[in-house]
Image (cartoon, helix red, strand yellow):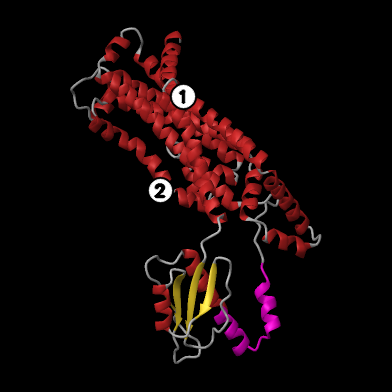
Amino acid sequence: MKKILLIISREYLSRVKKKSFWILTIVVPLLLAALYAIPIYMAMKPQEKSTVLVVDDTGLFGGAFKSSKEIVYRSAGSLDYAQRRMEEEDSVSAVLYIPARETTIPGDAFLYYTGDVPTANLQSNVSEQLQSHIRTIILQDVYGITQEEFDQVNATRIKLHTKDLKTGKDGFLEVKMAIGLVLGLIIFFVVLTFGGQVMTGVSEEKTSRIIEVIVSSVKPFQLMMGKVIGIGLVGLTQFVLWIALSMVGLAGIQAANPDLFEAAKSRQNMTELATKGTDAVEQMQALNEAPVVTEMVQGLTAIDFPLIIAMFLVYFVLGYFFYATLYAGVGALVDSDTNAQQFSLPITIPLMLVMIMMPAIINEPSGSLSVWLSMIPFTSPVAMMIRIPFGVPVWQAAVSIGILLLFVPLNTWVAGHIYKRGILLYGKKITYKDIFSWFKTN
């Protein structure tokens, strides 16, 4: 045991003392924060003003297009005149041309531009206003609905809120999807990165023949376990530091923007009051007008982060040991990058498979595919962490962890057997047939 502790200490300290470890520890949370902060910032940032010239040959859309702070609509007499203005004036972003047709209702419209393509927001706004006015014409002229009736129908909005009947909490689907995606990616990269470090470390020591000196005083199994545990503690240290940095960052954001969190709390109270019928109309209208950022903050505050952190630690430890022991066995087999790819590919394929299936898991976290992927030990660390924010039945989590607990010792035994046989083999091309024969002879 003393020798294993010495190896653990060496593997741990040699990596923690590197500058790259601390740079990665600080950079990764910043990148993850930027990944979600930048789109939010861009969504809140005022857009540049765009001008659209409208050429309506049908005569049906006179004054129908409503301008906003970002998009201004102006009528133009003819298409040629509008195109000349667009070429001469930089402020004109596009020309909307609605040609006349033999039928009463036009079926096509064209958005012309020169140079820069109109933004997706501009195209969406033009399309929505076209469709809205066509509906207005049909409802009023064809079906005889009055303007007052139309305005009342058009002003009606209903926002869907998902709620858990047992707990009474909101679902916050978008927030849970984002957290599940982040957790799945973190587990994937952590297992792949630190498992790869185990394989690389063993392979380098074997290639440099340092391993011959080490195994003269330490048993191969002790050396393998020391490496696996030492590098695993490096990953655990990094995760703990990430949690600490995240908590500090969250506290800083809360201190800098207390109104944002108060608004989120008020929004939750409004939701509860509205569902109980107290001034329901006014309350729900205020809810619908609440900023998107406030809804996201409310969603984050509703997440059970202690449970997520606890489950992450469990699946990190078990998932890492499950794969790291296999990577250690592969490292003992190879003495070149080509051989490493040959033997590591079957180990990596399940991880890649679950990443490919990630959209399906997020779309249906309680579906059969998601449940099976979270039970199979090769995919469960990633699949289960994607599902955790959505809520997982206790029995499924228990079965998933139990299966991993059964397979981790089995993997350790298999990897230890391969490690012991392959660590001192040089110059021989090892095949899968050779590996199977080792288990038959012992």
Tell me the element at label 2: helix
Q: Amino acid at mark 2?
A: Ile
Report the residue at 80% width, 62% height from top: 279
Dot 1 amino acid type: Val
Q: Is residue 151 magenta?
A: yes
- Please name whichever residue, 250 or 243, is drawn nearer the observer in this view of the structure: 250
Q: Earlier in the sequence, mark 2 or mark 1?
A: 1
Q: Which mark is residue 89?
A: none
Residue 41 lies, with reference to residue 429, above or below; the image says below
CA distance separating discs 2 and 1: 28 Å
Q: Residue at x 61, y 38 (%)?
A: 250
* Label ID, residue 356: 2
Of helix, strand and loop, which one carries label 1? Answer: helix
Residue 382 appears in the picture as rendered: no
Residue neighbourhood size for the residue with mark 1, other residues' Cα within 10 Å, grouped as few (<14), some (14–19), many (≥20) = some
Where is residue 59? Give x, y as percent. Answer: 52, 88
Considering depth in this image, is 402 or 118 the residue closer to the camera?
118
For the point 44% across and 72% down, which residue is it?
A: 94
List x then y, in percent, for residue 54.
49, 79
Kindly tell me whether residue 77 is visible in this rendering.
yes
Residue annotated with mark 1? 234
